[in-house]
């Protein structure tokens, strides 16, 4: 099964926006292989606009010329991805990433390039042209490049088949599809044909949907047709966004399971916004980063690093390589919040092997606070030992656990039965 | 702690509406003590209008005369509850129930009798009269008897103190407060003072809130100020209502825990509507009743029998006395649905003792169906044996569990690690 | 026909709230007869709570004792209306007002006194008691005294028949019914039986409905069942409320006509709030008062003076006795706004006799401004002379009329054909 | 002033959809000049898609090739409008229409052709190209051809200047702009620059906005920036649509005046849908057509004939050439409904010259009915004679006028003072 546990990797957006290039991708892949792979991190994702020669920031350019082949399929801009020359596409870069023992992912927009329709380009292996299946009224509200497909036409799936055939040929392992996760109900059918094309392409490709918030009412549809989907709009290094995630995580936690993962979005850690502000680093405090990782792990969100890995400091690297914490992604199940208030929150997650439960305590207030959890209220059968996992400290067992927390901080415990 | 596990008992409404009398209560208490107490059933609740001499059906009578004492506190109508004579209130009946090893509960409406305010009766142990703290604009939309209190006034709590003092004196163990659970936000403060009065009355009294649906947005407030609260409007023996409960159960399951229980309402089983239609029995099929008990147990809803127990047939008694099924209420935690669709649903709940998990499979369709659950998708560490709990049959372990189900039917499995 | 032109009178609310007394009513009636009657002012209205001995401010008292007869019909509190003694009700006061050549009006609330229902008082000339036709769930949101009737019961009209019979006997000419004009759709049927009782009582009584805003969607129902109805919530001496009236006047103007008048509420002029603040006068500037009268006249709203008339200064008296301005109420028809913007507004109204049209120009800005109206844009056949009616000045005819206006000021022109 | 009275003309849509051609336009212009011009009809309008060679029905073709010049300005398809050859555009056809003593109008869509932006064509007389001012996210929901402009950019108006310069050069007198009247608030600014371009082009061009319903909240903006605007979605020969117009006419009537006219849309009379169903004629009964003309005239809507004029039968021609009825468009003002109910309606409109008022009585029921209007209720000064204008019959003056009407029928009276 694809994505039996939550995917873990790196994505170029938080650092490079629309402008990432091949050298950067290779450097980050090298770093991941050397420093993070041993902890479960294994996927490298090239985000949006890799097909636009002129992209150089977080902005989108109306009516930009996009590189595409004769079937209206986008191809990497060779000035940014030199190995793509001679029609090789992302295959050389994917090969390189695979050679490091990692997986290779790309970002795409729902639909086809607008000019593919206006030019009436043929669809590969199909007796139609792009104008016949493009929907001139289906556009993205925030990106000017594409037309959605007329998903009601049987012929429309041929275009998605043609692009996933190309991605399979390149060796793509992960596709993040944008302009789709919150576009219910009008894009429901389009997701179905896209998903079918992905699953029928002959290669195991993790299907990730953006942007959020995906609508909770379509949870079962998302579980059936994708492997992960965004539960929020873009997440950045801003405490209010992190605080708001607690409510969303609570709403979505029951839909988390093998093969289908509510996605709290990328982790804005370390060096950020390199294309605009090369000296910029995350605005999250260390306490906030600990809170973020604690929540993402106990809710079993996919983990996608947003920062430039080659610039990681010791704190950031330690944050992302705590085996006892990362174990939660694979060892726990049935997580849910005990409560969520303005000031504090708590989550619990039993271990699948029956040896105990994880408990996370969060201080959501702007001041230091002691967050206390009565063991009786935890509704557990028994507790024989308690360890705080970020510090590996043993906690003496009394009637309750009291976490002394900095503003926006968290502790994470393993309570053994 | 009060209500450490979900309360289990009997309530007079489904059979007797506003008209239950003392003899009926005693007979049902006797039956419970003899046949159900050994399985955990232990609470007898007298529902609405016990203070109205003329109540004889499910209807409410505008401007009826209600029996009350000189402090505006309702007292049992002596023509219906003879042991209440000489100002003894429910104490003799509570004593009787306690003598059977059971607990005694009553229903009340939020607020005070309208006439207590119009008559300006004094409030017990307080230097105010009822007119000073009644809110002439706070009335119930479906019952004509009461005015809510002006909860913003510090003096208002004195009235709730006075009634809970009386209930403590009578020996009441369970109070179901009506016209409050869905009355957010306007009755939020009134719930707080009522809850404080209950918890400060000197006796452990389970606080149950009606009617539903309580608003999900106030989950933490409900958890803090009550022991159980209704998640739906009145539930009756109608498949559409039962089917709709799956969605509500999914929304509320993360808020279930020691001391605070989302309540799916009474179980309409056996003889029903005795005050209107003495020959009436539940319209649920046996399959539907099995589905109902399975869902209520795996979501850990309180269980309140709605039927006339003395008329139970074998099926109904068996349904309510399956130890392996009822064990789920105390042995499981962290339950949640795996999925809920138009046609089928599945729930999982780990055992607190780490020895395995419960799995419930439901056929929501109107035809027989085989509901299949892949073990790999269950995200468990290991499975060593599988037993179906309604039949106590051992299931051979293969890659999946296939439940052959009648229309609206369910199976319930224990998967041991 | 009743109310063939918009009613003109005085109402006690703006000055005396719930506390007006007989002496004050007589003094104001005397003043109107002496100073205003010649200009069309002819109605004296006693507003709310005349049946409550303890009323002394603008506040309502929960659970107050109300004076009523044995049929649950409210009667004047004799401590406030001495002539009502010996069961004479308002008849002596109405006689006095009639003796001055004026009409007498009272305010009532929809429904019956709550205690009439709780006491089960008999309904006059009907074989029912009040409890049988009162609706315990129909209460006013802002006044604690009454229950609405169960208007779906054929018997309910008997109560309204009984009170209008009493008012006819007293000699009442005008009844302002409160808690009804904006209570659509739930009180639609109750208005119908109340209106039928009014029209069938044997005396011509103008039926006025409050409070506003009445819903525009029920305009035809209001026209059919009443003579005037409030188009706003309570109007006071606050510029923002006056400015907002332009939008409401525009929405309602097409529903103005013989017998049915959209009502912009009382005129807060002169001495105000005498029961709370005896030295208080209107907070409107003279310009704002001119704007108010201009708008009320050109839209043909009923005119009800809110101030204490005996304290009128010269300006206020002049404002209310400009014959040329007040003529518009009877001489014009088919008025409508030419435009309404943030800064200015203009209205036009043809004279019924075909001799010309009225034009009002308003400066809604907070600074002085010249509001210009092109004659060509007026869409008139011809203009032979122009007079400003507040000043009686002749305006020289050019291509446009330019009104030099103070902040919140207005001018009013008669353009003769 | 432009459009001092409501425009009257013919439009090709109801008969020819997107497919009208030059021969048809000339034939209808000839007919109008011969038979209708004497009654005030004077404008010939070519509706949508005159720039698409392949248009042949009411359907729109995605990604169709549109004829345009080097500045991205649409030009007539020469296969359909042969006189447009050699870059002459609509000038020869406009000349022809002018030669008949008539005015010439065209339809346009808001924005520019999509391909003008994708091709980055230069904007005439401006230092920008189309891609710089087109908005890739501003598309029409029902037509695939255009991008709206980035109206916030100062440069954007240059494109609208360029097209109105062309229309002025061609001799266009009337422009119907589509995809704009109901596109508030997002197209508010775009309407402002389009309107400024129209008014600054050096030629008097009536500006008409579609489609409806325009939002009532923007009435003043519409009055300021256009000469007429649609108050409904497309109107066709369907009684439910005609009945619904009464409510819309009531809501908009106060905004009717010299230069700015709420537009009830084209008149579906005579031969219709010629491009699809050559034998089709209007589905309206004669009574319904009389009702339609009566309402359109008394509300002073623009009148645009939708049928193929050369096929008019006697009834249709008579309907459109009743001088006494059509006079209302120029002789009346301040019209408004007296009432509008499910079954009937009445309107009144004073004559500007003071000699009387028009009264229209409508039977909206599906059965014959007598609609009675009391003269006293009309609020008029005096009535000396009454004439029914469709029949030219004198009506005897009594206390009321009683119109004996067929289902969906109307009568129209002149009441002289």
Image (spheres, coloured by chain):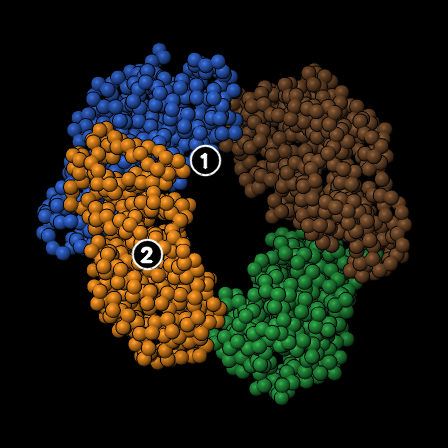
Chain colours: A orange, B blue, C brown, D green
Q: Is residue B397 above or below residue D203?
A: above
Picture quadrant where residue D157 is located: bottom right
Residue C120, given in percent of the width and then of the height, sits at 53, 22
User: Residue C107 sits in which quadrant?
Assistant: top right
Q: Position of residue D202 (x, y in %)?
A: 73, 73
- In the picture, measured across the screen, residue A114 lies left or right of residue D312, that is left
Q: Residue at x 20, y 31 (%)?
A: A397
Mark nearest the camera among 1 and 2 is 2
Quarter containing the C terminus of chain B: top left
| Relative horizontal placement of residue B78, taking residue D329 as reference (left or right) | left
- In the figure, is residue B380 to the left or right of D191? left
- Say how many tags the image has: 2
Counting from the top left corner in percent of width and height, residue D230 is at 63, 63
Quadrant of the snapshot with the N terminus of chain B: top left
Residue at the spot of label 2: A311
Q: CA distance from mark 1 to mark 2?
A: 50 Å
Residue where numbered disc 1 is placed: B185
The answer to which of A52 and B292 lies nearer the viewer is A52
Q: Give SS at disc 1.
A: loop
Q: Residue at x 29, y 50 (%)?
A: A314
Residue toward you, B346 or D325:
B346
Give me the chain letter of mark 2: A
Q: Tell me: C169 left or right of A294.
A: right
- Asked whether residue A412 appears in the rendered view, the answer is yes
Residue B271 in sight from this viewpoint: no
Residue at 39% in and 35% down: A367
């Amino acid at each position: 099964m694809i994505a039996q546990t939550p995917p873990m990797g790196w994505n170029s957006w938080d650092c490079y926006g629309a402008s990432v290039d091949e050298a950067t991708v290779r450097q980050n892949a090298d770093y991941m292989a050397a420093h993070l792979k041993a902890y479960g991190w294994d996927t490298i994702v090239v985000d949006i606009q890799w097909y636009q020669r002129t992209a150089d920031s977080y902005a989108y350019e109306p009516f930009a010329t996009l590189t595409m082949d004769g079937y209206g399929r986008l191809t990497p801009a060779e000035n940014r991805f030199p190995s793509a020359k001679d029609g090789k596409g992302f295959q050389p870069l994917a090969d390189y990433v695979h050679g490091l023992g990692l997986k290779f992912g790309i970002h795409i927009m729902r639909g086809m390039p607008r000019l593919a329709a206006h030019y009436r380009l043929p669809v590969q292996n199909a007796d139609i042209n792009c104008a016949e299946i493009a929907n001139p009224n289906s556009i993205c509200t925030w990106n000017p490049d594409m037309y959605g497909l007329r998903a009601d036409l049987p012929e429309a799936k041929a275009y998605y088949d043609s692009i996933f055939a190309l991605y399979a040929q390149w060796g793509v392992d992960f596709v993040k599809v944008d302009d789709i996760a919150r576009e219910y109900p009008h894009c429901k059918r389009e997701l179905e044909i896209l998903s079918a094309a992905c699953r029928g392409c002959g290669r195991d490709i993790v299907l990730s949907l953006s942007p959020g918030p995906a609508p909770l009412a379509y949870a079962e549809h998302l579980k059936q047709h994708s492997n992960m989907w965004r539960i929020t709009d873009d997440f950045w290094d801003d405490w209010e966004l992190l605080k708001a995630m607690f409510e969303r995580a609570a709403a979505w936690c029951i839909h988390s399971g093998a093969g289908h993962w509510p996605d709290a979005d990328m982790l804005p850690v370390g060096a950020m916004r390199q294309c605009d502000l090369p000296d910029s680093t995350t605005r999250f405090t260390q306490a906030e980063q600990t809170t973020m990782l604690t929540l993402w792990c106990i809710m079993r969100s996919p983990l996608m690093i947003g920062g430039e890995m080659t610039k990681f400091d010791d704190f950031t690297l330690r944050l992302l390589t705590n085996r006892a914490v990362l174990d939660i992604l694979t060892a726990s199940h049935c997580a849910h919040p005990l409560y969520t208030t303005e000031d504090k929150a708590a989550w619990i997650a039993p271990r699948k092997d029956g040896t105990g439960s994880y408990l996370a305590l969060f201080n959501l207030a702007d001041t230091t606070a002691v967050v206390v959890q009565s063991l009786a209220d935890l509704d557990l059968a028994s507790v024989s030992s308690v360890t705080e996992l970020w510090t590996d400290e043993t906690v003496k067992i009394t009637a309750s656990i009291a976490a002394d927390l900095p503003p926006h901080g968290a502790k994470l415990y393993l309570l053994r039965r």
